[in-house]
Image (spheres, rainbow, N blue to C red):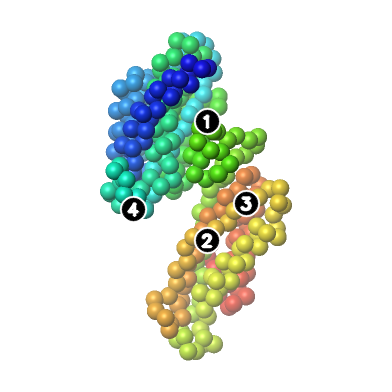
């Protein structure tokens, strides 16, 4: 094991270089042609086998086949960025108006590093390791697109590993890996609620039905699902990230839209959250003479 760790440290500068190259070319959603081309180029250089491209769009997969018999392990790395303008001023900063602000450039670089290290030791490797490079993590479409296109077949993995950089947790420091029994990474769901009322003048609210008031009430009420309806032993997170309604200061809008995300750690809680969000949004709107479309 000491030898492997020393080799991993030795290719650290290469992993850093990969990450910085990728950091300069962030792409969004399922449209990652430049990123995929870079991954393909590096996989071919290091001698990966059975390289497949354009899986579910621009996804990439490759194999490292050990010479000894064994099971099939998959290692998955996401590779898309975010629609954020980078202002770090770093010499390798993105200049295309998008940014790897969530660490997917690092995930991809780490997976390339693991592939390079395993290729160097495939004569000692029992089984096969399948590397999966997935676009579309941020829009929650990439995994399904690649699965529908057969990435989990030929060969089918016995197990799959994924990770996220430590920017989400402070408990694990540099050089440390955090693990736990049970679910660790939450399911990510996005929701949008459109509140509809009746527009009018700000001076005569009694003649209108105000969707901004409905949305404002719902933003607060939705949090009671977390604080008063879920067991503290089965937690979830609900965040409203966007609220938009109206066009000027003295006119009551006809619509107001809120968008948010729900994170859950079990299928049962996920289903419960969807049911309660729909019910609470509708009842809040109805109580204020409006309607809600979830």
Q: Which of marks 3 and 1 is nearer the N terminus?
A: 1
Tell me the CA gap for discs 4 and 3: 32 Å
Q: How far apart are marks 3 and 1 (CA)?
A: 23 Å
- Residue 151 location in percent, x, y? 44, 30
Compare residues 193 and 175 and report the one nearer the observer. 175
Asked whether residue 103 appears in the rendered view, the answer is yes
Q: Do the residues labelled 3 and 1 touch (CB within 8 Å)?
A: no
Q: Name the residue under label 1.
A: 161
Residue sitting at 29 percent across and 43 percent down? 91
- Give the residue pinned by disc 4: 87
Q: Given contact means CB atoms under 8 Å apart, are the residues at marks 4 and 1 in contact?
A: no
**Displayed quadrant of residue 224:** bottom right
Distance CA(mark 2)–CA(mark 3): 14 Å
- Label 4 and label 1: CA atoms lie apart by 32 Å
Spot occupied by residue 17 in the image (x, y as percentages of width and height): 33, 32
Question: Between disc 4 and disc 1, whose residue precedes?
Answer: 4
Left-right relation of 285 to 234: left
Label 2 and label 4: CA atoms lie apart by 25 Å
């Amino acid at each position: 094991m000491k030898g492997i760790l020393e080799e991993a440290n030795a290719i650290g500068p290469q992993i850093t270089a990969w990450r910085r190259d990728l950091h300069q070319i962030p792409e969004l959603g399922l449209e990652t042609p430049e990123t995929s081309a870079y991954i393909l180029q590096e996989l071919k250089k290091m001698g990966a086998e059975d390289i497949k491209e354009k899986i579910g769009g621009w996804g990439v997969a490759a194999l490292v086949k050990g010479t000894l018999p064994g099971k099939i392990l998959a290692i998955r790395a996401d590779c898309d960025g975010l629609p954020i303008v980078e202002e770090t001023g770093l010499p390798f900063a993105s200049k295309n108006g998008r940014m790897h602000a969530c660490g997917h450039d690092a995930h991809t670089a780490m997976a390339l590093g693991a592939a390079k290290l395993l290729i160097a030791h495939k004569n000692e490797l029992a089984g096969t390791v399948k590397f999966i490079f997935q676009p579309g993590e941020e829009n929650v479409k990439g995994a399904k697109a690649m699965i529908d296109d057969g990435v989990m077949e030929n060969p089918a993995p016995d197990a799959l590993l994924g990770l996220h950089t430590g920017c989400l947790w402070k408990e694990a420091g540099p050089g440390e890996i955090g693990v736990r029994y049970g679910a660790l990474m939450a399911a990510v769901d996005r929701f949008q609620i459109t509140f509809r009322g009746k527009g009018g003048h700000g001076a005569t609210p009694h003649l209108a039905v105000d969707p901004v008031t409905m949305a404002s009430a719902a933003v607060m009420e939705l949090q009671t699902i977390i604080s008063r309806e879920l067991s503290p032993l089965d937690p979830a997170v609900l965040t409203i990230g966007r609220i938009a309604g109206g066009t000027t200061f003295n006119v009551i809008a006809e619509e107001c839209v809120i968008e948010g995300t729900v994170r859950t750690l079990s299928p049962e809680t996920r289903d419960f959250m969807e049911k309660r969000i729909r019910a609470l949004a509708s009842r809040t709107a109805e109580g204020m003479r409006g309607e809600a479309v979830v």
